[in-house]
């Protein structure tokens, strides 16, 4: 049985602890070993959590360990790649209440939150964070290292490239592409292509930067 280590022991890390206990495979293919965080005091004052095991910057994975990363923002990919470079493997963690349609593919290290729906024939790449109550429409294509927040809707045929942030309650319309390294603000309705490196906001969404 694998031992799960949660990277980051802040609020999201503690949330991941709860989610991990409610996800497919808990108690059967993995148990939870603890946290790693460069702030070794991150759990001080919080009870009922597994132990702090060390710092991210120098943690050496072992063969029986798997990881999930709760850290967001620009540091997320760097942190994960450091662990991968040391031989670490990331768990694909899917909440038991998530619904995956026919022929759905979910890549290594992707996290799918509670009550999320991924429609028929959608393809999801590696190391994505798809939070609770989101909807990924049929035939959508999602790349790697994306953050898709809670209550986001990607309508059928949407394309999301790599390293995007799509924030709470945003909606991406049919067959729209969100290019790599772009941002969609909360509650936005996106009806046209989002260009790489830009931020869009509003209804309909317009470019901010």
Image: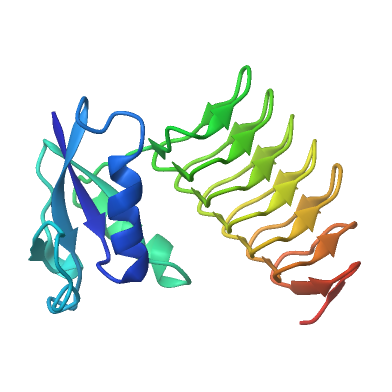
Residue lying at 80% horizontally and 62% vertically, measured from the top left:
194
Quadrant occupied by the C terminus: bottom right
Residue lying at 85% horizontally and 49% vertically, measured from the top left:
173
Count of number-bearing discs? 0
Above or below, 87 against 73 in this view is: above
Residue lying at 59% horizontally and 24% vertically, measured from the top left:
104
Above or below, 200 against 119 in this view is: below
Q: Given the current orientation, which residue lies at the most extreme bottom position?
A: 209
Q: Position of residue 98 (x, y in %)?
A: 52, 34
In depth, the one of 108 and 85 nearer the eye is 108
Above or below, 31 against 44 in this view is: above
Q: In the drawing, does residue 133 fall left or right of residue 19?
A: right
Above or below, 63 against 38 in this view is: above
Residue lying at 16% horizontally and 59% vertically, measured from the top left:
49
Q: Given the current orientation, which residue lies at the most extreme front position?
A: 47
Q: Position of residue 37 (x, y in %)?
A: 20, 69
Q: Position of residue 188 (x, y in %)?
A: 79, 66
Q: Quadrant of residue 52?
A: bottom left
In depth, the one of 118 and 97 nearer the eye is 97
């Amino acid at each position: 049985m694998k031992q799960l280590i949660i990277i980051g022991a802040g609020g999201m890390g503690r949330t991941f602890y709860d989610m991990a206990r409610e996800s497919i495979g808990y108690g059967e293919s993995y148990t939870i070993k603890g946290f790693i965080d460069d702030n070794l005091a991150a759990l001080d004052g919080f009870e009922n959590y597994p132990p702090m095991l060390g710092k991210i910057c120098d943690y050496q994975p072992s063969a029986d360990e798997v990881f999930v990363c709760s850290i967001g923002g620009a540091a997320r990919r760097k942190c994960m790649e450091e662990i991968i470079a040391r031989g670490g493997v990331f768990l694909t963690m899917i909440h038991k209440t998530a619904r995956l349609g026919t022929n759905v593919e979910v890549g290594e290290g992707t996290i799918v939150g509670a009550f999320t729906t991924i429609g028929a024939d959608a393809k999801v790449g590696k190391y994505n964070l798809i939070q609770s109550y989101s909807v990924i429409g049929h035939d959508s294509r999602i790349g790697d290292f994306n953050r898709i927040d809670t209550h986001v809707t990607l309508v059928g045929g949407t394309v999301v490239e790599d390293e995007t942030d799509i924030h709470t309650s945003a909606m991406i319309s049919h067959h729209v592409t969100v290019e790599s390294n772009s941002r969609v603000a909360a509650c936005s309705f996106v009806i046209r292509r989002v260009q790489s490196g830009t931020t869009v906001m509003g209804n309909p969404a317009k470019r901010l930067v």
